[in-house]
Amino acid sequence: GQQLNQSPQSMFIQEGEDVSMNCTSSSIFNTWLWYKQEPGEGPVLLIALYKAGELTSNGRLTAQFGITRKDSFLNISASIPSDVGIYFCAGRSGAGSYQLTFGKGTKLSVIP
Amino acid sequence: DGGITQSPKYLFRKEGQNVTLSCEQNLNHDAMYWYRQDPGQGLRLIYYSQIVNDFQKGDIAEGYSVSREKKESFPLTVTSAQKNPTAFYLCASSSPGLAGSGELFFGEGSRLTVL
């Protein structure tokens, strides 16, 4: 099946620093989604991207749909302790498809 | 409030027993999903259902069964045939949106531990 390579696997950063993570695929996707999961909870949708080249912000979070349609990036500016969690990317390859492919996640730790 | 409710939050089971996890949504979504999550792993699709009385196997359906008798409900049974059932189970739902681009919304998860 399709696979998404998400990197880095984990990050330790100082409070106030900016964060960047990305997902790449050998296949083309027409939708990219970014989720955040806190311990013991379900993932929460952060940003959805539907067009190649699209750049979308949600507060301090910004995500981009790569122009090749094979990658996506998530940036977090001025990190705060509550940003801690696991961030997942997910992609959908076909219109009408109900199945998403998930990356393995980036675990973010913020040092106060 | 609209959302997805999973129960129980925590469940312990002895080997050889079947167990059923509940998932209910009041979002009026057509599609529902079950995912399994293991430490350090992404989400793996067990089963999904696009409409009532219809469902399809995902990537790791062996040892699991589902039913979709109502739009709001999509229970998952972890059978004794599942070799390694201890995991965190996530239910999700979505509406088709534009051109099938609906986003998934997740419940809070159920953690199953086999003793």
Image (tube, coloured by chain):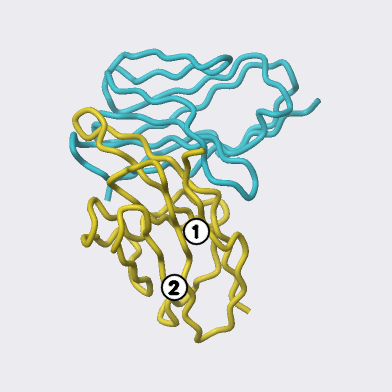
Depth check: B38 or B97 in front?
A: B97
Depth check: A13 or B114 in front?
A: B114
Q: Are marks 1 and 2 on the same chain?
A: yes
Image coordinates for residue B29, horizontal then vertical, percent: 32, 43
At label 2, counting other C-alpha atoms closer than 10 Å, the crowd grade (few under 14, some 14-19, many 20 or more) is many
Image coordinates for residue A83, horizontal then vertical, percent: 66, 28
Image coordinates for residue A68, horizontal then vertical, percent: 26, 21
Image coordinates for residue B41, horizontal then vertical, percent: 50, 51
What residue occupies the far right of the structure in this picture? Answer: A112
Q: Which chain hosts label 1?
A: B
What residue occupies the far bottom of the structure in this picture? Answer: B16
**1 and 2 marks in contact (CB < 8 Å):** yes
Mark sitting earlier along the chain (1/2) = 2
Does B84 sit left or right of A109 as displayed?
A: left
Q: Locate residue A29: give its quadrant.
A: top left
Depth check: B87 or B41 in front?
A: B87
Label 1 secondary element: strand
Q: Which chain hosts label 2?
A: B
Distance (Cα) linking label 1 and label 2:
10 Å
Q: Is residue B88 above or below residue A102?
A: below
Tell me the quarter of the image containing the C terminus of chain A.
top right
Q: Amino acid at mark 1?
A: Tyr
For the colour cyan, the matching chain is A
Residue at (53%, 57%) from the top-left corner? B38
Label 2 secondary element: strand
Chain B palette colour? yellow
Residue B89: mark in rendering: 1
Residue at (27%, 51%) from the top-left corner? A1
Q: Amino acid at mark 2?
A: Val
Q: Which residue is mark 2?
A: B78
At label 1, counting other C-alpha atoms closer than 10 Å, the crowd grade (few under 14, some 14-19, many 20 or more) is many
